[in-house]
Image: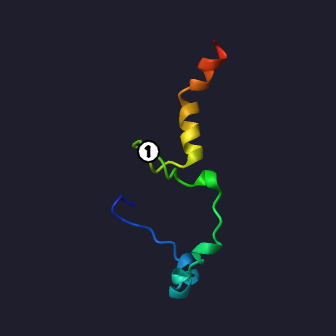
Amino acid sequence: MSDSEAQINCHLVDLVDDAWRSDQLPKDEISVPVYELTDPEADSGDVHLTLIEQEQKWTDIMLTALSEHQ
């Protein structure tokens, strides 16, 4: 099979119909933890990052290790 050929999973055809595809949850019934939301006050270029992703970004560059060695 080459890259230009797509394989279609035939099992999903029976499960997904128009009614299932158009079904949506009401927005007021979806609870999202605060740390999973994007920062509403973000003024940097990373406005798409969630609060937890922003925290992990700082720990990825080992800034916490600086305070341990002083």
| Amino acid type shown at disc 1 | Asp
Residue drawn at x 63%, y 61% is: 32
Left or right of 20? Residue 5 is: left
> Residue at image x 44%, y 68%?
7
Q: Residue furthest front?
A: 41
Q: Quadrant of residue 26?
A: bottom right
Q: Quadrant of the C terminus?
A: top right
53 w.r.t. 67: above or below:
below
Where does label 1 land, which residue?
46
| Horizontal side, residue 10 vs residue 70: left or right | left
Residue at point 46% right, 51% down? 48
Element under label 1?
A: loop
Residue 64: x and y, percent? 61, 25
Query: How far across and how far down the image is residue 28, in percent?
Result: 61, 73
- Seen in the picture, residue 13 relative to 1 is either above or below; the reply is below
- Residue 33: percent from left, percent from top: 65, 57
Most foreground residue, 20 or 23? 23
Q: Nearer the viewer, residue 3 or 64?
A: 64
Q: Residue at x 57, y 46 (%)?
A: 51
The vertical placement of 44 against 64, above or below, is below
Please identify the residue farthest to the left as the structure is shown. 4
| Residue 16 placement: quadrant | bottom right
Task: Pick whichever, 30 or 19, lies toward us.
Answer: 30
